[in-house]
Each structure stands twice: as structure tokens, then as C-alpha cells.
Amino acid sequence: MSLLQIQKDYSALQQLGYKLDLTRGKPSSQQLDLSVELLDLPGRSDFFADDKTDTRNYGGLQGLPEARRLFTNLLGAPQEQIVIGNNASLALMHDHVAFALLKGTCDSSEPWSKQGEIAFLCPVPGYDRHFKICEDYGIRMIPIRLQEDGPDMDEVERLVASDSSIKGMWCIPKYSNPTGTVYSDSVVERLAGMKTAANDFRIFWDNAYGVHHLTEEKISIANILERCAAKGNPNRAFVFASTSKITFAGAGLSAVAASKENIQWLLTRLTPRTIGPDKINQLRHVRFLKDEVGIAALMEKHRQLLAPKFQAVLDVFEAELSNLKDVSWTTPKGGYFISLDVASGCAKRVVALAKDAGVVLTPAGATHPYGKDPEDRTIRIAPSFPGLAEVQQAAKAVALCVRLAAEEKLQSK
Amino acid sequence: MSLLQIQKDYSALQQLGYKLDLTRGKPSSQQLDLSVELLDLPGRSDFFADDKTDTRNYGGLQGLPEARRLFTNLLGAPQEQIVIGNNASLALMHDHVAFALLKGTCDSSEPWSKQGEIAFLCPVPGYDRHFKICEDYGIRMIPIRLQEDGPDMDEVERLVASDSSIKGMWCIPKYSNPTGTVYSDSVVERLAGMKTAANDFRIFWDNAYGVHHLTEEKISIANILERCAAKGNPNRAFVFASTSKITFAGAGLSAVAASKENIQWLLTRLTPRTIGPDKINQLRHVRFLKDEVGIAALMEKHRQLLAPKFQAVLDVFEAELSNLKDVSWTTPKGGYFISLDVASGCAKRVVALAKDAGVVLTPAGATHPYGKDPEDRTIRIAPSFPGLAEVQQAAKAVALCVRLAAEEKLQSK
């Protein structure tokens, strides 16, 4: 099709006056409705935990045992090695970094902030909010290419072995944001066993999408905590999860699991900060979700709502973009995102074109440290929030913008 | 009475097998029952904020406008200058300190952690959890004697004027923990206007007991934010409050107010940490408390439950201790504590004696930085949690221990 024809189509698109938003991985109202029971729990008559704790009062720094039990499967750790936080696992991750900066980990000789410039490995494309924490605290970010089965482990092993300033690594091991990548057992094994120059190196294992399947295939991944322990590095990983995309995005529970020593460190760090988390919300979640069977049943309902939206995007991309050179996209089996790679140097232009046609996308570059995608290629597509018809409209609009940007580039050569 | 007779009474006390706890300022079950309606709010049908925000989803970093409005009177600031946090104002205070250490305040040339050793002024007796934050992060604590109308301002002014390492000061300006002290207008005026060598000096104004009256006299204090602004030091104070002792101790709302510039700083600091606080709990509180009239009515019910317990302790002390040399106690008009001063060098002994008679008290020294009361005199009495009869029993037991310790000391001379 000629540039002129595509431009004409784009003008027509602009006339439609769309107001669509594919920016953030927010659950839709229909998904939130699945947890409507939470809204009047625990009820007025029984607000006691299993051990008769009055959940309304102070205390319980580690979280109710029954709330911790809810997470044992998701986190791959016994309840003794789990701590429950308030509504955002991002806050837990942030606080772990802040605590390590101010006080050091349980294996640090000094606080991270007193060890000169430190660095984190950042698999790319990745999650902008992980990168933002590093950027904010001046932690140098080293991008690591994400491959089919996880980060480029040759590169990871080479870097951590020689550079003791590398203190951490962000990982979204399952249905990764935004590519949907699932870490292979071999990658997990190498992460657990690799030699690190820093003996207080930490993996931030953000298992945000552990039960968030989009297909019949319920993928499992290796247990990082077990593998680290087996390899003699028990304190290497912190594993995070939340119910933000299980129950309510803004009012769920967060949780972290780690070795006994790390959990002791964390509880010591949390003690000056709070007398305890919101235990009523923990009780609410236990009463509603019940156990991992309850969680799985709920996640199946999420899948029924989400899978058609992902399929709609994939169908449009297949129909409109499959013959385009240098354009590709992921086909995730879980999680909240599709990662779209356009021709080099075109991502910003596509996002700008989409915006001018009423379709807001995550800023190009957001998937990379410092918001800078060196190839300007990757665009994160988040189809969860709008309705199915709108997702389809938005995907078509995005596809047109991709074609327009590609044609513009061709003509400008 | 002879030492022998007191010892006999003490042995008899031990035989009673008490298990009483006067350690922490926890609301009683009866107090928590006053907010039973929160337990099934907001209900399944209406979970939207006034501006139609779906409170179940992500977002709303600063907190719902109607939740912020709930705090305007308590914090003495317009809703634009208020941020709502999750269930613990202690966490907000901790995070302010951590943020200042890692990044500096909006007036800092460098992060506090890069300015050498820093110090906080700590009015004593004071709140152990304030002191714990400083101790944990290696912030030197300088005790300041709390007088009838607030901290010794001559000393405060002298110190802050000459020592630029003094970056902060803890204040509980109303019904202070543990003395019940109320800061006079003149003290507030001097705090707001004093010259500080550090231009990033901050007052942590923990208005934990702002509406927690114990008498008919509802005391008001001067507005620190207004006074600081009037004196040309608009960024000097952060004002904290929570509903922990209004609704549920473990599942309330926390809030902070400050100048526009400070709030902008705080929101920038919070952005990497969280997408937003639990908005459903905010909605729950707005629906239940409604407004400041609703809060005042609820606090009156708390007072009906609390005042008799305080009176019981005061009556016992009056009857048993008023003829004892060097023993005195406060008569608070609000808050959660009575501060008991025993003869110098006797506080630890009293706490140990009480423990052996089945009455647990806050450790002696907890009211001072580093847990060290140089005179070993001050004991914090928290009568809120046990039932009235138990409070009376406990007070009698404590009084006996005070007399025994005093007599022991006399004999040993």
C-alpha cells in the first residue's frame, strides 16, 4: 500500500475520535467484580484470626499465619519464611532496596550506600517501575538481553563474577513484563549457582504473574529459593508476589519469601517502621480466597476475561503486520502484556502517531533503563483494561500507526 | 509501714497470680467495637469515590480527596497539602526519615546520610518508637527536658542555632506520650520561628492524640504549619496523624500534612515506591466517620470508656503514693498514658517487682533515647487495654511495688 493511502487511512482513523488507553496493566472492572465478596468481608461478627488474634488491633509484624499459608505455593516457601505486606509488592521491593542502601543486607559488611557506586542487572525489555527504583537511588543499571528462556546467562555470569559493585538483579521469571518470557530451569539453576564477586548480591524475583495463565497450559518454573539453597547460596533471592492482579489492584496483599536469615533481617528492618500490616485485609483475603485451589479457580475466571483480549490483539497484528519487515511481537502464555517490536528507530514515532489518533500507549523506551531503548524498537501493549471491542479498535489503530511509521521511514531514506 | 509489712503484702500480691499488661497504648476490644461498621463497608454495591474513581483499582497516590478532607481539621491543612498513607503513621514518619537520609529534603544540598553524623532533638520523656527510628539509622539523639508547656525552648533554640548537624526534632504536641503534656502557643511560636543552623531542619509533629480528649475540656493547640509559614519557615514541619486510635489500631488510615513544596517532595519520593495506597480502606473510613463532627462524636464514646480507667489509676496513686517522697505522676487531659516518676534509681526495680507479681509494664528507660533513663525514674503507665477492674488491680500492684522499691532503697542506705 502506498504512503498516501496509509496516510489517508490514518486521517480517517483520527476522525473517529478514539479515546483508548493501552498504557498500564490494570485489571478491568469485570475482573475486579470477580472479588466483589471482599467488599463486605470480614463482616461484623467474626474478626478473629485462627489463633484468636483480634485482627482490628495492633501487632502481627510478619502477617497472620493463615495469610502466609495462602502464599506458600505462589512463593515456593513455608509460611515461616514469608512476610505479608500491605497493598503493593512494589513497596516491599522498594523498601528492600532502601533498607540495603541504609543498613546493608544480612551478608553486607557495610550498607550498600557506603560501598561506592553500585549496580543492578536489568533484563530488557523489563518493567519500568523496577528501573525507576534504581534510577531514583542512583543505582547504575546494566541492561541484559532477555532471550527466549530468560536473561542472557553467559553475560550475567561474566558480569557478576568480576564486578563486586553489582549488588542486585531484577527478574520477572514467569510471563515476564512485557515479553511474557518464562525462565527455563537451566536459567534458574545458573542464577542460583553462579559465582558472584559481591557476597551480598541479591536477586529480586518478582513473581508478579505466578498464577496468571492465559492458556490451558499452566506453566511451572523452578523454585529459586530451593535452588539457591541447594547451591549453597541460601540468601541470594527475595521472592515477591501480590494479589493485586488476583483480587483488587489497589487493595490486595503483598508478600515476600526468602531464607530464614533474610526473613530475620527483614523483620528486624521492619520493626522500627511499623507495628504491623493491615490484618483485617489479610483476614478478608483468607476468607475469600481460602487456599490455592480457590486462587486457581479465581484465576481461571480472570483468564476467561483476559484471553480473548490478548487473542484480539494477536489476530489484528497477524492480519496487519505479518508481512512487515523488522516487525515482531510476543505471544505470551500468561501475564498482562504483549511486547511489540517495530522497525529500529520507529517506536517513538508509533507511540506519537497513536496518541494523535486517540490511543495512548506506554511511552516508548519505558521498557528499558532510564527510559532509553537504544534501538527505539520496543512498545508495550497492555490489553487488560479496555473492553474487547475497544481492544480490537486500539490494536487496529496501533497496527496502522506501525505501518505508517515504517512507510515514512522507507520514504525518508 | 515497715519494709517487712510491705514485703508481706507483696508476697500476698504474688499469690494472686495476676496476668495483667499495662505495656502498650492499645485500644480495648470495647473501643474497637465502636467502629464495627467498618467491618462490612464499603459493601458490594458502591465502591466509587466522589469523583467516580473505582477504589478497587490502581492509582491515587495522594489519597482520595474525601479522605484527605477527613483530616483537614486534625492536621490543620487544606486537602491539597495532605497525603494519605496505609495503616501506620509510624511508617510515614520512618519513610520521611529514610527518604531524607537517602535523598535529602527539598531544602537539602545533599542527602542527610552524606552530611556526616546528624542529630535529632528528643523531648523526654517521649515515645520509644520515635527514638528507635533514630537509633536504627545511627542518628544521634539529644534529650531535651519536657516542661509543663512543652520542650525546654531555651535549650532547643540554643542547640539548633549553633549546630547544623541537628536536622530534626520529634514532637508530640498534644497529650504527649507519656506525660500528657500540651505545647503552649508560645512554645509553638518559638519552634516555628527559631533560627536553625541547618536550613533543612525538620520538625516531626506527631499529632497522634489530636482529638483524644479525656476530659470535658477539649484543648486546642496552635497550628504549627501556619505558624511556620508566618515566620518564613514554611517547610519546617511535617504533621502526622492516624485513625489508629480513632477506628482500628491495626487497620486505620495514616496521614501527613506539610507545605506545598514538602508535599511535592513527598509525592516525588513516593512515586518509585507505590502506585497508591489502599483506597477502599479510605472509602470505608469516609463512609463511617463522615466528617469532623462524626470523628468528634466517636471520640466522645472512646472517652466514656477510657476516662474511668485513667481515673482509677489516678485514684489508686493518690491513695497509695501521695505521701511518698520523690514520687509523682501526671494527670493527663487526653492521650493514652500516665507518666509515673518514682524515686531516683528505682524505676527498673519497680518494673521488675511488678513483673514478678504478674503485672507487665513498659520497660523502664523506654521513654528515653537508647532506652536509657539517666535517673532511672520514669515509668509509662498505659491503662487503655485491660478492663476497668483489672486496671484498678494493676494500679494497686504497681503502687505496692513503688512503695517496696522505695523502702528497699531507704533500708540499703
Image: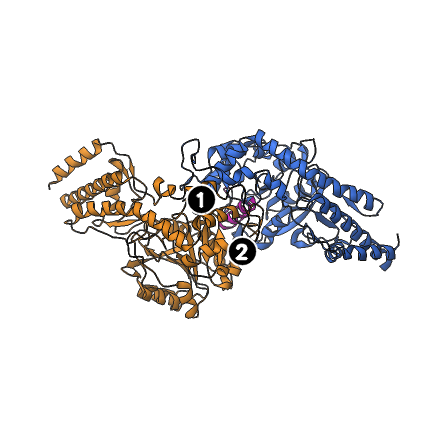
Chain colours: A orange, B blue
Please tell me how crowded label 2 is: few (under 14), some (14-19), or many (20+) other residues with Cα within 10 Å: some
Q: Which residue is at the front of the view, A162 or A307?
A: A307
Q: Which residue is at the front of the view, A112 or A82?
A: A82
Q: At 44% from the left edge and 31% from the top edge, which residue is drawn? A: B50
- The picture places residue A244, in percent across and down from the top left corner, at 41, 47
Span of residues in magenta? B89-106
Relative vertical location of residue A326 with respect to residue A12 in this rendering, above or below: below
Instruction: Work out how far the residue at label 2 is from the one at label 1, CA to CA, in angstroms.
Output: 24 Å
Q: Quadrant of residue A1?
A: top left
- The picture places residue A48, in percent across and down from the top left corner, at 55, 48
Q: Which residue is at the front of the view, B131 or A245?
A: A245
| Kind of residue at badge 2 | Arg
Left-right relation of B68 to A245? right
Q: Chain of mark 2?
A: A
Q: Chain of mark 1?
A: A
Q: Nearer the viewer, mark 2 or mark 1?
A: 1
Left-right relation of B389 to B77? right
Tell which circle, 2 or 1, labels the residue nearer the N-terminal end. 1
User: Do dots 2 and 1 share one subunit?
Assistant: yes
Q: Which residue is mark 1?
A: A251
Q: Which residue is mark 2?
A: A269
- The picture places residue A208, in percent across and down from the top left corner, at 38, 53
Q: Secondary structure at mark 2?
A: helix
Please tell me how crowded label 1 is: few (under 14), some (14-19), or many (20+) other residues with Cα within 10 Å: many
Q: Secondary structure at mark 1?
A: loop
Relative vertical location of residue B116 with respect to residue B287 in this rendering, above or below: below
Q: Quadrant of residue B148?
A: top right
Left-right relation of B300 to B396? left
